[in-house]
Amino acid sequence: MLAGLDDVKVTQNVTDAEGRQGTAVSVVEHYEAGGVSENRLVFDEATGRALASEYVVVKPGGLQAGFEPGTVWSSNALIEAGWTDDRPAS
């Protein structure tokens, strides 16, 4: 569904911070300080399971000024997800 949107880019064979292969759907974000990043969601295409969310430097600037283009400068990996009927611990 996301891949069908005009501003969304699809990249296959992306490796997340945990070393897992997946497909990324991403959008470009422009910052006031001049930098440009790609905000991407990496998922396992076979299962539809989310693997990670990442920001990749496209054009250095602002907080990403010291990074080379293509650098993953922020990453959150989803290790486990599931359902439960248990209440959160207090």
Image (tube, helix red, strand yellow):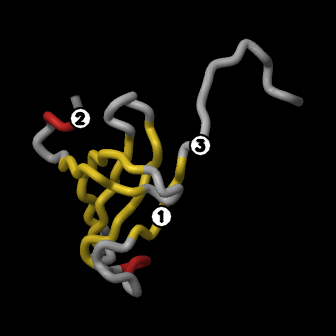
Does 83 appear above or below 24? above
Please give the residue where the numbered disc 3 appears in the rendered image.
79
Pointer 1 residue: 74
Badge 1 crowding class, 10 Å Cα cut-off, few under 14, some 14 to 19, many 20 or more, is: few
Query: If you read the primary sequence from the N terminus, does the residue marked by circle 2 or circle 1 appear first?
Result: 2
CA gap, disc 2 and disc 1: 21 Å
Query: 62 left or right of 3?
Result: right
The residue at the point 22 percent across, 28 percent down is 1
Determine whether, in the image, residue 59 is placed left or right of residue 66. Answer: left
Q: Amino acid at mark 3?
A: Ile
Question: Compared to 68, does 1 lie above or below?
Answer: above
Mark 3: which secondary structure?
Answer: loop
Name above or below for residue 37 compared with residue 80.
below
- Percent position (x, y) of residue 9? 18, 49
Q: Amino acid at mark 1?
A: Ser
Query: Callout 3: few (<14), some (14-19), or many (20+) C-alpha neighbours within 10 Å?
Result: few
Disc 3 to disc 2, C-alpha distance: 22 Å
Mark 3 or mark 2, whichever is nearer to me: 3
Of 22 and 82, nearer the camera is 22
Q: Gap in Å between the C-alphas at discs 3 and 1?
A: 16 Å
Left or right: where 77 falls relative to 63: right
Lateral position of residue 19 relative to residue 60, left or right: right
User: Residue drawn 30% across and 48% down?
Assistant: 24
Q: Residues within 10 Å of mark 2 (few under 14, many from 20)?
A: few
Residue that mark 2 sits on: 2
In the picture as drawn, the residue positioned furthest to the top comes out as 85
